[in-house]
Image (cartoon, rainbow, N blue to C red):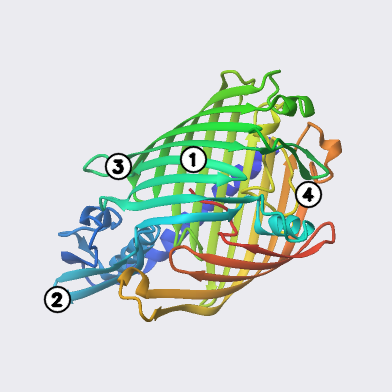
Amino acid sequence: MKYFLIIFLLAVSSNYLISNNKINIYANDSLAIEEIIISNIKIKGNKKTKKEIILRELDFKVGEKISINKLKVKIYDAKENLTNLNLFNFIEFEYKEIENNVSIQVKLTERWYVWPYPIFEISDRNFNVWWHDFKQSNYSDLTRINYGLFINIENFRGRNELIILKYRRGFKEHYQLNYKVPFLKKNQNLGINTDIEFFRRKKTFYKTQGDSLLFFEDKENFTSKDLIVHFDVIFRNNIKILNKLKAKYFLTNINDSINILNPNYLSNNSNKASYLRFSYNFIYENRNNKNYPLEGNYINIEASKSVGLSSPINHLELNSHLEYHHKIKETFFIGSSFRSRITYKNLQSYFTNETFGFNDYVRGYEYYVVDGKDYWLSKSSIKTCLIKPKKFTIPYFKMEQFRKSHYSVYLSVFSDLGYARNIQNFNENLLTNSIMWGRGVSLDYVTYYNKMIRLEFTINSLSEKGVFLHFSNPFGTNK
């Protein structure tokens, strides 16, 4: 119940902040002398993107009567919505008043949408873990490298559809086909996402001991294989709100030796396990940029029911992810996030217990893996903009999608708190069932195509200091 109370209080406070933001924004609307009519909306620069995809993100339309104050707010929101489509490098709005009418122009610089590129990447949980093991091998062990080909076709047919094709060999083989259609109907409120993935490994981690992963390896045969099939139905009646109904099928096959080394890996006295998972997902997106947010709110609540087929997995699960970001002054910002998981079953199979050390982690504990059926994670930061977003032109590039670029640099002080609850094998891992605290300083370089580099100096509760390199949003992955 205490976890429910935490989530409830945070959700209430987030809704309070959202409603207060709206009240404050519109407070001066009464100062407008009169309403004017939107006479036309011109869109420039959408060489591929269909006009209706852009208009869907605007909370105003031709013929609407509106005050100038309110229009300014809606233009600000529209720019955020278009930014979070990840279809454009630059977005500019201009409006011109003529008597009782206003003409609006949207200027866009589209991104490059087709990305066929070779895969050559590390297979470890993060860069520092890979570098540590690489250094231990006297810089000779290249077995933890993945290679292959990845094709990402964004904005397919100009309708913001996505196609992903992946062929990856190496340490962790991965084959993927994904097709996402955000809008099936003319009113653009219904979409689907289909995905099928296949993984196989010759080296599989089978247990967590000493807050580290133990691996089983067979150089001749694959030690584990996973098949995952997703099908999502997406409802979007409101510009900022998504509702998803999701179904997932999961099948895994492991080497018999893994069952001997850890009978709780699948918990079914077999080397195969499968289950179905059905979920409802509510998402409220009100951040100015979901890839590196500085202002706004975000709420993501998911309730799931797992049904075991050949696996004993059969439980309810509640996941939450809340964020709040605020600009204090022109170049100073605060941000915070809260993530949690509650599982309504005490005994869990090992392969479902991934918690900290993978997608979620407490900064300063990147070297460790912490399992748990339940967890919570809080991240907070205060940051200042050292270099405001700068636009520049790259010489010798004629293609507009690459010629115009931008970058910015931020310095932040951060503090993370995390806790994972585990009732299985907790005596073998010191960090389980204990508060983890990481704090430090981060230097963030942010540029176009959602690329960023974070260099962090951290101190954790174990009095360990470290320098870590990351390439993603510090508040976690956002889907």
Which dot, 3 or 2, sits closer to the camera? 3
Q: CA distance from mark 3 to mark 2?
A: 34 Å
Q: Which residue is disc 2 drawn over?
A: 98
For the residue labelled by badge 1, is the local secondary structure a helix, a strand or a loop?
strand
Q: Position of residue 374 (x, y in %)?
A: 69, 37
Q: Are marks 1 and 2 in contact (CB under 8 Å)?
A: no
Q: Which residue is disc 1 drawn over?
A: 175
Q: Amino acid at mark 2?
A: Ile
Question: Based on the displayed image, in which of its 4 quarters is residue 432 positioned?
Answer: top right
Chain-order first, disc 4 or disc 2 = 2
Q: Residue furthest front?
A: 220
Let me know if residue 188 appears in the view.
Answer: yes
Above/below status of 104 relative to 220: below
Q: Position of residue 165 (x, y in %)?
A: 41, 45
Above/below status of 141 relative to 2: below
Q: 439 or 143: which is nearer to us?
A: 143
Q: Residue at x 41, y 41 (%)?
A: 178
Q: Amino acid at mark 1?
A: Tyr
Q: CA distance from mark 3 to mark 1?
A: 30 Å
Q: Which residue is disc 3 drawn over?
A: 189
Which dot, 4 or 2, sits closer to the camera? 4
Numbered tag placed on residue 435 in the rendering: 4
For the residue labelled by badge 3, is the local secondary structure a helix, a strand or a loop?
loop
For the residue labelled by badge 2, is the local secondary structure a helix, a strand or a loop?
strand
Q: 395 or 46: which is nearer to us?
A: 395
Chain-order first, disc 1 or disc 4 = 1
